[in-house]
Amino acid sequence: ASEEVRLILSGRDAVMTVTDNGPGIPHDILEDIFVPFFTTKDTGTGIGLSLSRQIIRMHGGELQVSSRPYSETSFTISLPLAPGNLYA
């Protein structure tokens, strides 16, 4: 599998997308992966993505996912740039 990370400064937001070409996530559970304690793994706790999304939202951002099974999956984090930031 290969991964790609992109960071874009767009207006007042920083947008980071991480994409891989693994097996993907089935569409019927795509939003379930953000539900606390939901997991598809035998040893998973189901807390990681839920907690990540919550922390990102507390900072005024968003965590989104898109997936094409057997092709690629992308997670996109968008966060507002801090006031006074050099790039804002």
Image (cartoon, grey):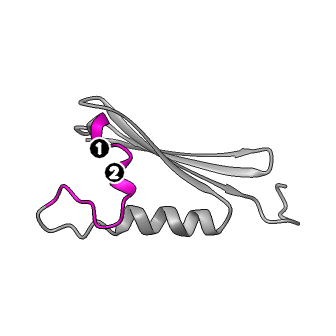
- Whole-angstrom CA distance, mark 1 to mark 2, is 5 Å
Query: Which of 58/84 is in front?
Result: 58
Query: Which of 59/81 is in front?
Result: 59
Q: Are marks 1 and 2 in contact (CB under 8 Å)?
A: yes
Q: Is the residue 85 above or below the residue 76 in the image?
A: below
Dominant secondary structure of the residues highlighted in magenta in the image: loop
Query: Which of 84/60 is in front?
Result: 60
Q: Image check: 7 left or right of 9? A: left
Residue at position x 54%, y 69% in the image? 55
Q: Quadrant of the C terminus?
A: bottom right
* Residue 44 placement (x, y as % from top left): 20, 67
What amino acid is found at the position of numbered circle 1 in the picture? Ile
Residue at position x 82%, y 55% in the image? 87
What amino acid is found at the position of numbered circle 2 in the picture? Asp
* Residue 68 placement (x, y as % from top left): 33, 30
Name which quarter of the figure residue 62 lies in: bottom right
Residue at position x 23%, y 59% in the image? 39
- Badge number at residue 32: 2
Mark 1 residue crowding within 10 angstroms, few (<14) / some (14–19) / many (20+): few
Name which quarter of the figure residue 81 lies in: bottom right
Q: Is residue 33 magenta?
A: yes
Name which quarter of the figure residue 25 lies in: top left
Q: Quadrant of the N terminus?
A: top left
Q: Which residues are magenta?
A: 27-41
Q: Image check: 39 left or right of 4? A: left
* Residue 7 placement (x, y as % from top left): 60, 47
List the residue tagged with mark 1: 29
Mark 2 residue crowding within 10 angstroms, few (<14) / some (14–19) / many (20+): some
* Residue 28 placement (x, y as % from top left): 28, 37
Q: Is the residue 76 above or below the residue 38 in the image?
A: above
Q: Is residue 29 magenta?
A: yes
